[in-house]
Amino acid sequence: MEQLASFFALMVLVLSILNVASPFLKFAVNLNMLQSWMLSLYILLVAINSGVFHLYLSFFATLVFKGLIVPILLFRVLRRIGKEREIDMVVSIPLAVVMSGMFVLVSSILSTKLTGLEFLFGRFVFVSSLSTLLIGGMLLVIRKILFSQILGLLIMENAIFLAANSAATGMPLIVELGVLFDILISVLISSVLLLRIRRSFEDIQVESLEVLKE
């Protein structure tokens, strides 16, 4: 079971790096959806291993909210804005992928230094969750399209869920449901703002908002 859990944790990390490497927005949403599925299956393994009932509900809630509802909303927004790929970025894709590899290396080093941490399925889960968190944060910085930054936030949230369900027997169900509802509302609000920005500025890059400072 530990090997299977490590595989799901690895896929969460790999899908984050693939998101960095892809300029295609629809493909990025598919990657994020698949990442949420991998996270859900990991939570299911934690539930089976620990025998904690609320983790089964957590698995179902994560799969439905993050693996189905949020991607459907993102696909609808993507069709409305009519944007297929992101061309202009702060750094090039090859450099961003190299930086992602550096994050994995730093996370691996930190995992050997933090001796007090205990994870259900080994320290690689810590490496995966921390690396994914850093990669999601990097996407917020290097991507100029607001839609891509929303995906970066979702990747960071997946990393936090992965760590929370690894270092202990998961978050309390009421807290997790609250977080999932917050994510859903945040995506809805961000989508509405994104569509309004598209109508007002005919663009969805952050630089287009500089005019609001004047």
Image (tube, helix red, strand yellow):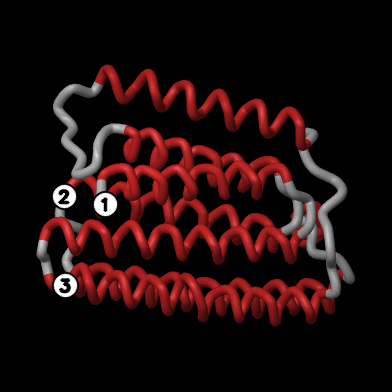
Question: CA–CA distance between discs 1 and 2?
Answer: 7 Å
Horizontal and vertical percent for residue 144? 75, 50
Left or right, 69 with respect to 72, comes to left
Horizontal and vertical percent for residue 35? 51, 58
Residue for badge 1:
164
Question: Disc 1 marks which amino acid?
Answer: Ala
Q: Earlier in the sequence, mark 1 or mark 3?
A: 3
Residue for badge 2:
168
Question: Disc 3 marks which amino acid?
Answer: His
Q: Secondary structure at mark 3?
A: helix
Does residue 66 appear in the picture of this structure? yes
x 68%, y 58%: residue: 28
Left or right, 100 with respect to 208, comes to left
Q: Quadrant of residue 189?
A: bottom right
Q: Quadrant of residue 25?
A: bottom right
Question: CA–CA distance between discs 2 and 3?
Answer: 13 Å
Horizontal and vertical percent for residue 195? 74, 78
Q: Secondary structure at mark 1?
A: helix
| Res. 77 mark | none
- Circle 1 or circle 3, nearest the eye: 3
Question: Disc 2 marks which amino acid?
Answer: Ala
- Whether the residues at callouts 1 and 2 have beta carbons within 8 Å, the answer is yes
Residue for badge 3:
54
Q: Is residue 41 above or below residue 81?
A: above
- How many marks the image carries: the answer is 3
x 79%, y 81%: residue: 80
Q: Nearer the viewer, residue 139 or 16?
A: 16
Q: Earlier in the sequence, mark 2 or mark 3?
A: 3
Q: Nearer the viewer, residue 200 or 159?
A: 159
Q: Secondary structure at mark 2?
A: loop
